Amino acid sequence: MAAWDAPPYPIRAAGATIPAFVGRAAETSAAEDAWASVRAGGRQVIFIGGEPGAGKSRLAAEIASAVYGQGAVVLLGTCSPEPGVPYQPFAECLEQLLGGTRSGALAGCLPDSAAELLRLTPLVWRHRPELVAPAGDGGDYRRELFDAIAALLLAVGEERPVVCVLEDLHWAGQPTLQLLDHVAQRSARTASRLLVLCTHRTTAPDRSDDLTFAIADLYRLDGVRRLDLAGLSVEEVAQYLVAEGRLSARRAREYATVLRDQTGGNPFFLRELWRDLAGSDVFTGAGAGGLPTRAFGARAPVSVRDTLQRRLSRLAPGERAVVETAAVLGDGGEVRVLIKACAADAATVLAALDAAVRFGLLDGAELGRGRIAFPHTLTRQAVLDLIDPSRLAGLHARVGEVLQASGSGSQAVIRQLAHHFARAAALGYGDTAAGYLRLAAREAERSLAFEDAAAWYAQAADLAGGSDPNREELWFDAADAYVRAGEFASARTHYLRLTDSRDPRVRLRAAIGYENAAWRPGLPGTQARALLAHALEGVPEDLDDPRYVWALASLGRATSFTGDAERSRRLADLALGAARRLGDRQLLRHALGTMMWQRAGPDSVGGHLELATELTPLAREAQDWFALGTSAVFRCAIAYIHGDRAAWTAAAADLELAVRGSGQPFIAFMHRSGDYAHAFLGGDFAAAARIAEDLLELGRSFGPDDTEGTYGLQMYMIRRETGGLEQVRPLLGAIRESSGTWEPGLLALYTELGLAQDASDLLWQLLDRVDETAALQSPWAQWTAVLVFLVEAALALDDVAAARRLRPLLAPYSGQQLIAGQFVAVFGPADAYLAALDALLGDRDSAERLFAAALAQATGFGALIHRASTLTAWAAHLRAAGDTDARTRMTGMRAEARRMAASTGQERLLRLLDQLDAAPGTEAGERDGQDGPDAAGLTPREIAVLQLLAAGSSNREIASRLKIAENTAANHVRSILLKTGAANRTQAATLAVTRGWISDPVSARPR
C-alpha cells in the first residue's frame, strides 16, 4: 500500500450533471480486461472514439470511477479548441497529482530530471523544493521532459495503479501527441501499472489527421486498444428512459423505437431531446397514458442545435445574453469575470445563470464553485453557433477587456487574452492580439512546445499591423520555431515568403534560413542555391561581414546538394578561410559544419575527419549542441568506414550529448540511425526492425520531406538477411511498373530472388550509365549502395565482363568498410567484395589476400554479420579452388560461418552454406564437420537447432535466435530425437558433439 493518500477524484468526472449510464457492455468488458492487465503490470492505452455526443466521456468516467474504487490514482486532463497550456492534458494531470497529495509525499517518485517538470507546473516544488528551474528555452531537448513525465507516472504506478483520462484528443497539438507516444512507448518496455484512456471525435470536421496517424502507429504496440462507439440500441435507449425518465419498462420500450430513429442512438442528442420532451406542456399534460408516440415526430428537432435553440428561445433576452457571454468566456471561466463582462449587477447575472441551469444549459455544481461549466462541449458550441458574427466579435472584445483590466499576468490569462482579442481582430484589436500571441508563443518555447509556438507566431504575424519589420520578425520567429520542431517543410514555407521582402538584409537572412531547413532532410539544393545567390547579389560583397560569410558558407553547402562538387568546394573554402581570418568562433563553427557536407571520396575521408575533429572542441566550448551533433554524426560514419570501434564509441557519446543538448529531431534521427547499425551489426534483426520503424515515425515529424526511402533500404537489408524477401515476390510486377522505383534496389531484389535473366538485363542497363551515376552521386550516399548491388548481381550471375567493369570502381574503397548514407545501410569491408570479384576474375592470390584483410577488419571491428558473410564468401572461393588444402580450410570456415549465422538467424547465409554443401565436388566428410553422408539425415536447419540445443537453449530461445515460431522449434527437436534415436535432448546433444556433427557448444551459446 502506498505511504500517501491518492489525490481526490477529479471534480469534472464526478459532476452532478452526469447522466445515467446504460449499454456499452462490450466496451466495459474490454476495459475490465485492460484493467486486469494493468494490475498485473501491463500498461494499457484505450482510444475511445465516436461522433460528438456518442458518450465517449461518459464511458471514460464510468471506467475511471470503477477503478478509483479499487485504489487507482485517477487523473483527468482535457484538450481545448482554444489556446491552452503546452501539453495541456498532461499538465492538468500533473497538477492534480502534485497538488492533490500532501507536500513531500511524492519526493521519492520524482526522477532525477524532475526539474524539467517545472516547465509545466510549479507544484513540483511542493515535493522537491530544492530543485532549480531549467534555464528558459536554452535547450530544445524534449526527451528529457518527456522522460521525466513518463518516469513520474511509472514510479507512482509502482505504489498505486495510475489512470490518466485524456479528453478530446482531436484538439491536441503535435507536442501533446508526441508526449502521448513517448509515454506509451516508454511504459511498454517495463512493468507499468498505467492505464491511459483517450477520448476523441472520429467525424468531420473535428477528426484529426495527426491523431489518426498517432493512433495507427501506437496500435501496433501491445496493450493498445480502440473502442469506436456506435449509437445506443433500441433496448439501451429504453434502459436510459427507465433510469433517467423514470418510465415503466413497457412505456420506455414504446418510446425507445421512435427516439432511436430520431437520434441515431446518440446519447447526448437523446438526453437533450428527452429533456425537452419531458419538460414540455404536451408531455406533462398527457396523463397516465403518456405522450402518444406519433406526437414525437411533430416535436422532434433535426439536430442538437435545434434542440438548444428552442431552449434558448424560452429565456428572457437578458438571460440569453448572459448565457452567450458565458459561452464566449468558456468552460472554467470565473463567474466574477462574467459579471463584469455582462456590465450588469451581480444579482441579475446570477439569476440568469440559475435560469440556464434549470434549462440544462449550465452545470449548477460548477457554478456553486464560482466557475462556468457547460454540460457538454456541444452545448457551448451550439450557443456560440447561434450568435451573430458581429455580436460574437464584440463579446470576445468585451471579455478580453475585462480580463486585461484584471491586471493578471499569468500565462493562462495571457493565452485567454490572445484568443479573445484575435477573435475580435475585425474590430481593431489585431495588434493587441499579436502582442499577446507573441507572449504565449514565447512561453510555449520555454515549455519546448515549438509547434504551438510556431503557430502562434504565425497568427500574430497575420494580425499585426504597423511596419513590415515587425511582421517580418514574427514570421522569422515562426520559421525558426518550426525548424526547432523539426517541421522543415513548414519552416521553408515561412522563410520563402520573406525572400520577397523589400529589405535586402531580410532577403539574405530568409535565404539562409531556407537553406538551413532544406539540407537536413537531404533535399536537392537547387532552390536554396538560387535563393542564396539572388540574395547575395542584393548586398555588398564583403568578406569582412560575418553575415555575408555565413551566407557564403550556406551557399557552398546548398551547391554541394546540387552535385556541383567543384564549385561548392570553392565556396566552402572561401567561407572557411574568411571565418578563420575574422576570428568569429560562431561563424567558424558554421563554416566547419557546412564543410562536413562537401563531397568526400574514399581518398578524402581523412580530410573530413580533420574538419570534424576541429569542430568538436569548438562546439563543446560554446555548448553549441547542433554543431557538436554535426561533427559527431560524421565522426561516427568515418569510424565505421575505418573500422575503428573505439572511435565510433567516442563519437556516439558526443552524439548522445548533442541530442540531449539540442533536442533537434534531425540530430535525434541521426543518433537513432547509429542505434540501427549497432543492432544490425550485432545480428539483432528484430531490434533493428523496431528502430527502423522508429526512424520512419521520427522522419514523418519532418513534415512531407520523405524518409521512406531510408526505411525501405533498411528493411530490405533486414529481410534479406533473415530470409524475408520471398513475401515481396508477388509484388515485383507492381514494383517494376512504379515510376518511383529505384532501379538498383530492383536489381538487388532480382539478385536475391534468383531471377537471373531480369537481373542480367537490368545490370547491364545500369552499367551502361554507371560512369554518369558515379559522377552525380556522393561516394558515401547512394553510390555505395548502387555499387554493392551491382557487384552482388555480377557475382551471383558469374558475369566476368561485369566484374571486370566494376572492379576499378570499387578498388578505391579497399581497406575501408562500405556504408550508404548515415548508417542507412552497412555492407562491411570493401575488401570482401573485391576478393570475390578477383576470385571470379581468376586472381586467386589477390582474392586470398583480400579475404584475409576483410576478415581481420570485420573481426577487429566486432561486426558479427560481416565476419559471418566474409567467411561464407571465402569458403565459396576455396570450394572452387578444389585442392586438398583449400577444402580443409573451407570446411572449418563453413562450420564457423554456420555457427554464427545460426546464432543470429541469418537465413541468407544459411541458405548459401546449404548450397555449398550440396555443390558437386564437396566430399561428404567436408559438410560442416558432419559424420557420414548426412549426419543421421539431419537437415542444415536441424543441425542449427542441434547446435543451440547443445548450448542449453530452450525451445523459446531457439525460436528467438532462429526467428522461427516456438512450435516450429519444438517440431525440429522432435525430428532430431526421431532421426538420431536419442531418448532426450541431452542425449541428442551428446551424440552430436561426440560424432562431430556440431562443434564446441560453448561457442554456439546464444549471445
Image (cartoon, rainbow, N blue to C red):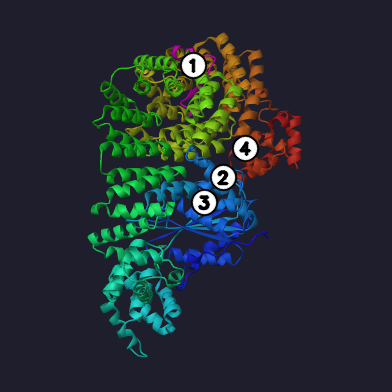
Disc number for residue 605: 1
Residue 152 in percent (x, y) is at: 59, 50
Mark closer to the chain start, 3 or 4: 3
Count residues near mark 1 (Cα–Cα under 10 Å), then give few for <14, some for 14-19, many for 20+: some
Give residue 286's quadrant in the image: bottom left
How far apart marks 3 and 4 lie (CA) works out to: 47 Å
**Span colored in magenta:** 808-824
- Image-based side of 834 in relation to 528, left or right: right
Are the residues flagged by discs 3 and 4 in contact, CB closer than 8 Å? no
Q: Amino acid at mark 4?
A: Arg
* Structural distance between the alpha carbons of marks 1 and 3: 49 Å
- For mark 4, what is the residue? 961
In the visual, does 667 lie left or right of 298? right
Q: CA distance from mark 4 to mark 1?
A: 37 Å
Vertical placement of residue 468 versus 110, above or below:
above
Which mark is nearer the camera, 4 or 1? 1
Label 1 sits on what residue type?
Val
2 or 3: tag closer to the N-terminus: 2
* Residue occupied by mark 3: 121
**Residue 234's image quarter?**
bottom left
Q: CA distance from mark 2 to mark 3?
A: 10 Å
Check whether the beta carbons of the residues at disc 1 and disc 2 lie within 8 A of each other. no
* Earlier residue among tags 2 and 4: 2
Drawn side of residue 824 relative to residue 977, left or right: left
Spatial separation of the CA atoms under disc 2 and disc 4:
42 Å
Q: Amino acid at mark 2?
A: Ala
How many circles with numbers are drawn on the protein?
4
- Quick one: label 2, few (<14), some, or many (20+) residues within 10 Å? many
User: Which of 662 and 437 lies nearest the eye of the viewer?
Assistant: 437
